[in-house]
Amino acid sequence: MKTFETKNVRNFALMGHSASGKTILADALLLLGGEINRIGSISEGSTTSDYSNDEIERQISIKTSLMHYEMNGIKCNILDTPGYMDFVGEVMSAAKVVENTLVAVNSTSGIEVGTEFAWNYVNNFDTTALIAMTMLDKEHTQFDKIVDTVRDRFSNRIYPVQIPVNAGPAFDSVIDLLKRKLLVFDSKGSYKEESVPAHLQDKFDTMYEELVEMVAESDDTLLERFFETGELTEDELKSGLKKAILEKNIFPLICLSSEKKVGVSRLMEIINDYYPDPSAKGSWKAVKDNKPLEIPVDETGVTALFVYKTVHEQHVGDTSYFKVVSGSLKVGDELKNPFTNGNERFGSIYLLNGKHRKEVSEIKAGDLGVAVKLKNTMTNHTLLNSKDTWTFEEIKYPEPVIRVAVEAAAKGDEEKIGTGLTQVQAEDPTFHFIVDSELKQTIVSGMGEIHLDISLKKISQRFNVEILQIQPRIPYRETIRKTATARYRHKKQSGGAGQFGEVELRIEPLPRGTGIEFVSELVGMNVDRAFVPSIEKGVRQACENGPLSGNKVIDVKAAVFDGKQHPVDSKDIAFQIAGRGAFRDAFEKADPILLEPIYEIEITIPEDYMGDVMGDISSRRGKVLGMDSDGHFQVIKAEVPLANLYKYSNTLRSICQGRGYHRRKFSHYEYVPREIQDKIVADYLKEREEGH
C-alpha cells in the first residue's frame, strides 16, 4: 500500500440515527472505490463495518468501524459510527479525529434523536458537514419536507446541491446544481450527464441562483464580482463553495440510494473536490504544564499521534486506533507516551476495512491507522517522538446514565470478572465500574442497557464466566433532627484484665454538608484527657454504620462532656466501645431520619410523549423542575430519587419508542418519607437477624 500525503487524505465520520442507512452507504462507497466486490446485507450480517457477533445478532452498529477507499489518488477514511445513544462514546471518539461529518438522514422518517446528536457533534467538534438524504428509492419519501425541517432545525446554511428526480422505487437520477446537469445512474453506479428536464428548469434556475448567492455572500471578493456581473463562473463557484464549506458557511445536502448505487459516485467526487484535507483545519489543541498549545497538522513536524479508541481482541491483543496529527509514523518507530513515561515500538502498522487489515510501512500527518500490542497505551493517550511532554486535549466523555450491581454466578469467579471489568473499562471510557465498600457491591455504569449488556457479555465470553446483574443498593444517609444525650458504661470483668469506660455525650444536628464534628467539653478529672481520641474513634466508627439502617451518618455534632474511669481497668478499647455505645443510644433518641440521594435528570423527547413521561416521573416520586423546547423536542428537567431510577433508560425507550434520551447527575440528599423509611429499616433489621 502506498503512503498518502496529508493533502490527499479526507477523513469523514458517518453519523446519523440508527437505521438511517450509514452501514450500507459505507459498503457502497467501498464497492465503488474497488475495496469490496458487492454491497453486504444487514439482515445476513455481511456488511463490512458490522462484523461482530453482537452487531450481526442485533442488526445494529455497536462500535465505530474504520474503513477507507482510494479514488483519483485521494484516500478517504470513513468512520461508520453507531446510531444508538448507548454507544455515544464511539461517536465522540470518531468526531475527535475527523475534519468532516457525513450526516445520513432517512428520506422517509427525517430528523430523529440520532440526527440531533450528529448535528451537535458537528458543532461541538467543529467539523464541516455534508448531509446525505438516503433511501430515496423507498416508498413515501419526503425530500422537500425534510429539507425544510433540516434547515429550520439545524441551520439555514444547509442547502441541497441536488434535486432528486422520480424519487421512489424507480429512483435513478438527480439534478446536480454544481454540474448544472441531470445525472442518470446505471446499475453499476456510473452516471451520464443529460440536460435538465424542461418541467424542472424553473425549479433548477431558482435553486441555482440561491446557491450562487449563498456562495457569493460567504466571500467579499466573490460578492463584489456577483454584484458586478450577476453570476459566478464555474471555477469561481467551485473555489467559493470549497471555502464556504471549510468555513462552515454552507453545508451541502445531496441525494442517495446506496442499495441502487444512485448518487454514490457523485458523492465521492464531491468529497474529493470540495471537502478539506486534514491540514486545512489548521492545528490541534494540546496542553503542556496546564498551558494550552496548538500543534499544526503538518507532515514535516515532530511525529505525534493521538489514540482515539482501544479494542481488546482475542488472539490479537489490544488494537490501538490512532490519528497521526503531525510528522509521519514508520514501521519500527519508537514513540514516548507522556502519560506513562514509557516507550512504544511500532512493529507493524495497518489500515482497516472493517475487520480486514492491510499492512503499510508509513502513515503521514492527518491519516488514520491501527497498531497492535502497544504495551501501556490507552484511549485518549498521546504518543510523541519528542523530549517534550505535551499531550493532546482529551475527549471528555459524558456521565453514565445507568448503573447495575454485578456478581459472579459461581463462587471463585470473582477474580476473573474483576480482570474483565478492568479490561473493558480501559477499552471503553463510557463504561465504569467501582467496588463500592460502602454498598459492599461491584457497581457498573454506562450509557444504556444495551451498552451494559454487551460490555458484560464480552467479559463472560472472554473468561467463560456467568455474570448476574442485580439492583444496586442505595447509598442512604442517616442523620438526626433533635438534640439528645446518652450515658453508656462498658464493663468487662470476665477472666484476665478487666475493661472499664463510661461516656456521657450529647449529639445535635448540623447543617447539610457539614459532616461529623466531635468536640470535648470535659471539665474536672472524671475522664483522663488521654482517652478523648479513643472516644472520638468510637463515635466515628458508629457513624460508618448508622444505627437505623447500617448506612453512613452525616451532619451530626457529638460532644463528650462527662464519664468515669477506673484506675486499673480503663484503657483505649474500653472508651472506644463506650463512645460507640453512647453515640448509638443518643442517636436513637434524637429523632433519627434517613436521607436518600436525589438525582437531577434531563429528558429530551418528541412533544407527543410529554404526558406519558411526566406521568411516569410522578409515579417515581419525581418533581418536575421545568420544561424547555428545543426545536420540535421537549426537554424536561426533574429531580427523582435514585432508588426509583433503576433501569430508567429502558422505561424511557419503551415510552417513546426509542426516540428519547436522558442525562443524569447527582443533586443532593433529601428526607425519605416516613413510610418508606420504616420499610428500609425493617428490611435492614431482618437482614441483620438472618446474619447477612
Image (tube, rainbow, N blue to C red):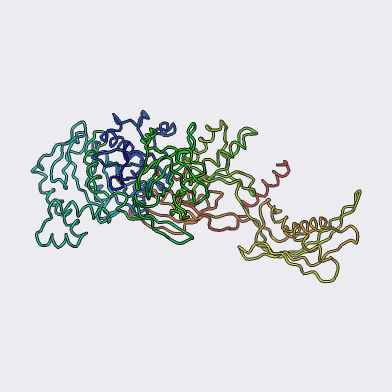
Instruction: Report x, y in % for residue 344.
Output: 48, 44
The N terminus appears in which quarter of the rendering?
Answer: top left
Give x and y (percent) for residue 564: 86, 63
In the rendered image, the residue lying farthest to the left is 198
Number of numbered discs overlaid on the protein picture:
0
Q: Indicate left or right for 262 with 426 as reference.
A: left
Residue at image position (28%, 45%) is 8
Image quadrant where one finds the C terminus: top right
Task: Tell me the residue at 33%/37% (across/down).
Answer: 23
User: Is 269 rendered above or below residue 601?
Assistant: above
> Which of the 4 image quadrants contains residue 598?
bottom right
Query: Going by the image, does 276 lie left or right of 216?
Result: right
Q: Inspect this view and state whether residue 679 appears.
A: no
User: Residue at 83% of width from left, 60% of height from top?
Assistant: 502
Residue 662: give x, y in percent of width and height: 44, 50
Quarter of the figure with residue 26? top left
x%, y% of residue 337?
Answer: 49, 49
In the displayed structure image, the side of residue 517 where residue 526 appears, left or right: right
Q: 90 or 472, which lies in front?
A: 90
Q: Nearer the viewer, residue 455 or 591?
A: 455
On the question of residue 479 being in view, the answer is yes
Q: Quadrant of residue 352?
A: top left
Residue 635 versus residue 242: which sits nearer the camera? 242
The vertical placement of 159 against 263, above or below, is: below
